[in-house]
Image (cartoon, rainbow, N blue to C red):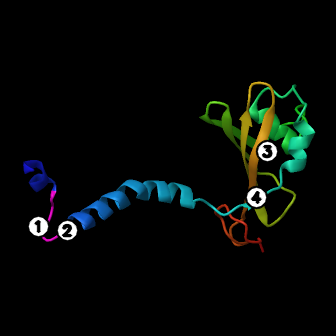
Amino acid sequence: MKTLKFIRFLPIVSRETMFRLLILFLFAPFLVYFAGCDDESIPEDVSLFNKKIEYNRDIKTAKELMDLYYNRSPEEPTRNLSIVEEPLTPGRFRVTLINSKLADDSREAERLVMICKFDGTKWKVVTVERSWRCYKGRGHTDWGIEPCG
C-alpha cells in the first residue's frame, strides 16, 4: 500500500479519474495514428485489378505491382516518377508512386499509395488511394482531393 501513495499525483483526484487518465494516455497515440491525421485521398476500387493479377506469377516486387497498376511498361523512362516501397510487416508493403510531370497546368503532381500483400506465390492489392497537389496560386499545395483551379 505504500507504493500507492507514490503513484498518486494529487490527493484530491480519485482512483477512477487516475485510471481513466491512464487509459486515455495509453490509447491516445493509437487513436491519433488510426484516426487519420493523414492527408485526404480518394480510395480506388482494386477488385478488377486483383482479378487481373490473380494468376500472374511474374511479379517479383511491390514496385513492379505498382508499375502494373499504374499501367506503365517497365521499359518506359521513370524520370517523372518516384516509386518508394516500404515493408510494413512480413509480406505486407506500402508503395508510394508520385508522378511529378502531369499534362495538367493546374496540378503539380499526383500520388498513389498502395497497400499490398504477398503470400509467397501471388500478390494482392489491399487498397490504393489517390491524391494530388496543385501549383502555387492554383489551389492547395499539400496532398489532397480538392480540385485545382
Q: State if disc 3 and disc 1 touch (CB < 8 Å).
A: no
Query: Pointer 4: what residue?
Result: 43
Q: Residue 82's spot in the image, x, y percent?
A: 73, 42
Q: Residue 131's spot in the image, x, y percent?
A: 73, 59
CA distance separating discs 1 and 2: 8 Å
CA distance separating discs 1 and 3: 62 Å
**Label 3 environment density (alpha carbons within 10 Å; few <14, some 14–19, many ≥20):** few
Q: Nearer the viewer, mark 1 or mark 2?
A: 2
Q: Amino acid at mark 2?
A: Ser
Residue located at (37% from left, 61% from top):
24
Q: State if disc 2 and disc 1 touch (CB < 8 Å).
A: no
Query: Pointer 1: what residue?
Result: 11
Q: Residue 21's spot in the image, x, y percent?
A: 30, 63
CA distance separating discs 3 and 4: 23 Å
Query: Pointer 3: what residue?
Result: 80
Q: State if disc 4 and disc 3 touch (CB < 8 Å).
A: no
Whichever of labels 3 and 2 marks the residue nearer the N terminus, that label is 2
Q: Is residue 127 left or right of residue 67?
A: left
- Residue 49, quarter of the rendered image: top right
Whichever of labels 1 and 3 marks the residue nearer the N terminus, that label is 1
Element at badge 2? loop
Residue located at (26% from left, 67% from top):
17
Whichever of labels 1 and 4 marks the residue nearer the N terminus, that label is 1
* Mark identifier at residue 14: 2
Q: Nearer the viewer, mark 3 or mark 2?
A: 2
Q: Is residue 71 visible from the viewing direction of this image?
A: no
- Residue 19, quarter of the rendered image: bottom left
Residue 99 versus residue 124: which sits nearer the camera?
A: 124
CA distance separating discs 4 and 2: 45 Å
Residue located at (79% from left, 45% from top):
80
